[in-house]
Amino acid sequence: MEDKEVIERGEELATRANNLYNEKKYKEALSKYIQSLQYFQYALKHKPDEVHKLRIEEYNNRVNEIKKHLKSLQRTEEIKDKLTLDEGLELFIKVEKPSIELSKIPVANKIVITLRNALRDKSSPILLYGPPGTGKLDLGKASATELNNNFYFLDYSDAENTWGSKADNLVHLVFKMARANLPAVVFISGIEALFPKKDSSHDLKTELLKQIKDKDTGLLVIAVSNFPWRLNPKIEAFEKRIYCSPYDTEGRIKLLKMYLKEIFASVTDEEFKELAKLTDGYVYWDISTLLFDVKTEARKMCKDAKKFIKDIDGCYIPTNPSNPEGIECTLGCLPEPHKLKFPSLTMNDLVKCIKPAIFNRFKEHLMRYEKWDAKFGTPS
């Protein structure tokens, strides 16, 4: 196999691995990352290349991250029989004291205003609903920050996969933990699994309703649904219901700046506005993929460079071949390879990496979200 074919195959596998990782299919992603690494390591062995080294380092970090996560799940499976039910279920309740400012989250202003109004009554349950990747978790954490509360994140689906029907005790446990550490926000992910349209788990629904209705000073319940039409009609238990719509233009500008400003120092505010138009429909996952793609573009610029310049920190940055201050050398001949630094890319470099939004697959549901919001949502 030619070197070019080896690299192309490695890049193809890496792209598939990234997509699987974003979909939380970690075992499948791990397999593809490892395969991709084998191709890049083969290429590096036959032709030393700093770009390949950077890729290998990045993918090795991702592989170790996934292995750590899978090992944690395996360990939970191995020890669950040795734990009391409460001890085991506590592994699925994440506790933290967030410091995310509501005003810094790149969502539409009307969402922030509606949520702030809802937070005035510090114990009225809130439902956040909308397409995946539209900032609902950050809004939950920001609510805890706004109220200076502890934050309890409950992921019922993960617990159910491990404990089966015993996971129903998780609802009682998370409220027990939160009430012992007031003030607190209990954030329930995937509420449709706990509060289904069909009464497939009557006892669990009754327990959840009991906990929600048993209001305590300093305890706020925030639930999230990506598909609100699957929820039980008794959803009125959540007195405030807020539609987290896809990012508007201003939200995408904030999102793009948040993730891309560091390596796109030369992109102006006007250009970011243009990028926001080009990325209509983008959510967090899309920005994450875009960031990976532009880093790949930066690696390509390093690989193809014929001249480098030193910055004030002594790092080597690719420069135009016509730059008289540039040092003539290729990537493989840098005097200090460990001091290689990605270039600050331009608007054109970024535009080349823009692809159709992952969110497009949810566009068919938009009218459904809006119809549900019109019927059940809290007016902004």
Image: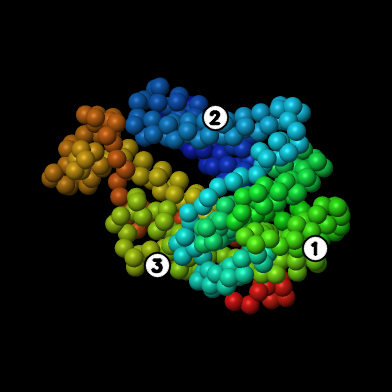
Q: Residues within 10 Å of mark 3 (few under 14, many from 20)?
A: some
Foreground of the two, 267 or 43: 267
Residue at 82% over, 52% down: 204
Numbered disc 3: secondary structure? helix
Choose top left, top right, bottom left or bottom right for residue 186: bottom right
Callout 2: helix, strand or loop?
Answer: helix
Image x and y of residue 102, in percent: 49, 63
Q: Label 3 near label 1: C-beta < 8 Å?
A: no
Measuring 17% from the left and 38% from the top, which residue is drawn there? Answer: 327
Mark closest to the chain's N terminus, 2 or 1: 2
Residue 11 position in % (x across, y down): 48, 38
- Along the horizontal axis of the image, is 334 left or right of 93? left
Q: Amino acid at mark 2?
A: Ile
Q: Are marks 2 and 1 in contact (CB under 8 Å)?
A: no
130 versus 292 height, above or below: below
Colour option used: rainbow
Of residue 345 and residue 127, the one placed in the foreground of this image is: 127
Q: CA distance from mark 2 to mark 3?
A: 38 Å
How far apart, in angstroms, are the residues tagged by discs 2 and 1? Answer: 43 Å
The residue pinned by badge 1 equals: 232
Q: Toward the viewer: 154 or 228?
A: 154
In the image, taking residue 256 as reference, residue 117 lies left or right, namely right
Position of residue 10 relative to residue 143, above or below, is above
Give the label on residue 34, or none. 2
Element marked by disc 1: loop
Front in this rendered view, residue 85 or 271 = 85
Q: Hey, which quadrant is residue 80 in on the image?
A: top right
* Label number found at residue 273: 3
Quarter location, residue 123: bottom right
Disc 1 to disc 3, how far (Cα)? 40 Å
